[in-house]
Image: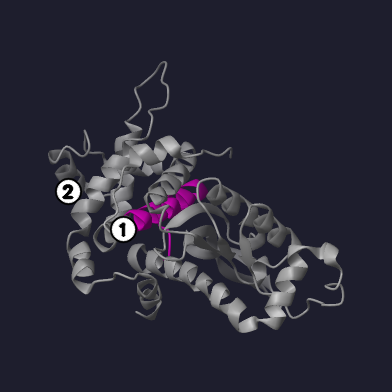
Amino acid sequence: MEQQRNLWDWTDNFSWSKYNESQMKEKTIFMQLLREICNLIEQPPHSKGRKPVNYSDMIYALALKNYLTFSSRRVHSDLKLAKELDLIHKEFHFNTLLKYLEEPSLKLILKELIEISALPLKQIELDFAVDATGFGTSKFVRWFDVKHGDKNAKRREFRKCHAMCGVKTNIITSVEVTEGYTHDSTQFEGVVKRTFSNWNVQEVSADKGYSSRKNLNLISELGAVPYIPFKKSTSGKRVRNHTLGIWGTMYRYFNEHKDEFLQHYHKRSNVESVFSMIKARFGNNVRCKKQISQDNEILLKCLCHNLCCLVQEIFLNKIDINFKKCADNYIAHKH
């Protein structure tokens, strides 16, 4: 509850009645928005052999499955209903859903859909935050427990989701999924550049794990102000050197106007809210056993989260959603 109050404090025209209405109508509007954004998916070229399933319908079915948090078997009746409403052309067998969840090409498609799904809020979001979180898997690996000297100890494997989000609406603007023990800072440049290419960014906040000259210079060169606190080990001896640029400037600001700095920095709490919302709503674990399926499952959670944010903003801020127009203005990325 406290995390959501942070969001409401940012929303000048928040109304309980509108919020309640958005929640009551969410599923119906979600299914419509999901259909509209899936219409952007182009069918891969096919020359010979058995005709593949319609990718647009397949991703719709997989996203609906994740939204409902159902198993591939239990979602069948909802797919039947979606077909009756002309939202998909056919009902998929549960084995077909699981098969296509392992498709490597889905990862790029889903990442682009997530980025496009955020663009209707482009005029609202100016400040952004970056962080990462882990999603547990059903697999355990052996490792050496240094503390207790247990060579047969086991720990759960997990996948890590690196995301950048707007701090007002909690919309995810770019995302990457990696192995669980990948350092957060290694993915910073990628998620930041993908957001900057499609958004007007004024501020970027992140925790101390991202504190480095390289990351601060990147944000500054892209035209925004980095609010990343400095580690205790950071020395101020070389700050007097004006050649330090943004690093020296922000270090002085951090030390001489700490309260003001922290007001900007604490906007990053909203990215924690994003992860909390996703895990509370769609689960903090992934069900699949293969890595590509796990990555696609996490990306589907992010896509569902974005569409739910859009439903809320339709009622709170009366935004208009035109995914076709957003896709026309979208700058794709090389992966």
Q: Residue at x 69, y 76 (%)?
A: 253
> Seen in the image, is 242 located left or right of residue 162?
right
- Number of other residues with Cα within 10 Å of mark 1, as a class: few under 14, some 14 to 19, many 20 or more: many
* Viewer-proximal residue among 150 and 22: 22
- Tell me the amino acid under the disc marked 1: Cys
User: In the image, residue 84 lies at what x, y percent?
Assistant: 12, 40
Q: Is residue 7 above or below residue 303?
A: below
In this rendering, the label closer to the viewer, 1 or 2: 1
User: In the image, residue 111 lies at what x, y percent?
Assistant: 47, 46
Report whether residue 116 is seen.
yes
* Viewer-proximal residue among 155 and 325: 325
- Looking at the rendering, in which quadrant would you find the C terminus? top right
User: In the image, residue 28 lies at what x, y percent?
Assistant: 18, 53
- Residue 292 lies in magenta, yes or no? yes
> Seen in the image, is 9 located left or right of residue 129?
left
* Viewer-proximal residue among 88 and 79: 88
User: Residue 191 got which mark?
Assistant: none
Q: Earlier in the sequence, mark 1 or mark 2?
A: 2
Q: Element type at marker 2?
A: helix
Magenta extent: 284-309
Q: Is residue 61 above or below residue 203?
A: above
* Helix, strand or loop for the magenta stretch, by majority: helix
Task: Residue under label 1, please give it.
Answer: 308
- Residue 335 lies in magenta, yes or no? no
Task: Residue under label 2, please give it.
Answer: 77
User: In the image, residue 278 lies at what x, y percent?
Assistant: 39, 64
Q: Residue at x 29, y 46 (%)?
A: 34
How far apart are labels 1 and 2 at the CA level? 22 Å
- Tell me the amino acid under the disc marked 2: Ser
- Looking at the rendering, in which quadrant would you find the N terminus? bottom left
